[in-house]
Image: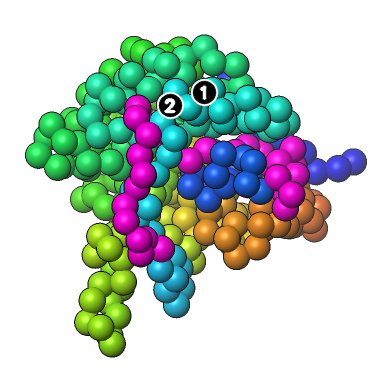
Amino acid sequence: MGVDLSIKLGNLHLRNPVLVASGTYGWGQEYGDLLDASQLGGLVTKAVTLRPREGNPPPRLVETSCGLLNSIGLANVGVEAFIREKLPHLRSLKTAVIVNVAGSTPEEYVEVVSMLEGQPGVDALEINISCPNVKEGGLILGSDPRLAFQLLSAIRKATKGFLIAKLSPNVTDIVAIAKSAVDAGVEAISLINTLVGMAIDVHSHRPRLSTVVGGLSGPAIKPVALAMVWKVAWKVSLPVIGVGGIMTAEDAIEFLLAGASAVQVGTANFVDPQSPVEIIRGLKDACARKGVGAIRELVGQMAMENTSNSQR
């Protein structure tokens, strides 16, 4: 009898717990010749905003010794073009399609979500609450529990669809933000988004990104992501999706043991487009070796005898 890799996130059913993260898999077409999307648990699209965005000027991508810095600036075609030009192909993929939604104001988020409401082929929405809120003087929507609650509550009223709140790690208390998302009525939480980082060219003495700072992803952020997943998974009742530095099946298992019900693979897609499939195979093999009949049996099963004094 084979290993059951299927996962249920509320009423969202995935064939396995491995998804590809927003911004690392394009619109699903870019990897068409490199990876069979039907093998994935799901695909998270690039961020979709109300209007098209060119993004930040180059240079906007810098490789570091243990990760990747990006300052793409949410470059995308806008929601109208997404529905018209990108969604038809996404509908043809035999995997769950999760649309990442971003904006500068709550009104923009709500309008994008309203336009996506009822669109065939959209299985869930991942709300990126790590974007600057222009009306609040440049504050990050996801850094304040009150602002996060207000935004997600407004979005909840605009859709009956499955909502996932994607949280920023650049906050004082990740659990407080997660609880505000729960109170607002989302069905799942994904974390983490990128950490703030920078790189400097020692020859020119200039920052290596046009925006000076950007988002750090890859293996460097895995310990931070793992800790935040553990903290949140033990404090909220919703499914958690772990994101951050997952390169191997062993990495994915760590997140599952910490409490994540599913994971997203991001930077690894740039290193090896076959990484998600290799991780899926690795999960199946690991479960078989351990005598685990279903992958969900691993969720939250980190032994706690050595962590009884830990602060959550």
Q: Amino acid at mark 1?
A: Ile
What residue did someone put label 2 on?
Answer: 79
Against 8, residue 5 (above or below) is below
Residue 49: give x, y in percent of width and height.
Answer: 37, 32
Q: Would residue 285 be found to the left or right of residue 195 on screen?
A: right
Where 63 sits versus 83, above or below?
below
Horizontal placement of 256 versus 240: left or right?
right
Res 70 → quadrant: bottom left
Residue 68: where, in percent of width, then height? 44, 65
Q: Residue furthest right?
A: 1
Q: 10 Å neighbourhood of mark 1: few (<14), some, or many (≥20)?
A: some
Q: How is the image coloured?
A: rainbow
Residue at the outermost bottom position: 203
Residues 83 and 63: in front is: 83
Q: CA distance from mark 1 to mark 2?
A: 6 Å
Q: Residue at x 35, y 39 (%)?
A: 53
Q: Are marks 1 and 2 in contact (CB under 8 Å)?
A: yes
Residue plotted at (23% across, 76% down): 206
* Numbered badge on residue 99: none
Looking at the image, which residue is at 24% across and 49% down? Answer: 171
Per the image, label 2 sits on a secondary structure element best described as helix
Asked where in the image residue 289 lies, by quadrant, the reply is bottom right
* Picture disc at residue 83: 1
Instruction: Using the rendered view, name the quadrant where residue 204 is placed.
Output: bottom left
Residue 20: x %, y % from top left: 58, 46
Screen quadrant of the N terminus: top right
**Amino acid type at mark 2:** Val
> In the rendered view, does 170 fall on the left or right side of 269?
left
Per the rendered image, the range of residues in magenta is 32-61
Q: Residues within 10 Å of mark 2 (few under 14, many from 20)?
A: many
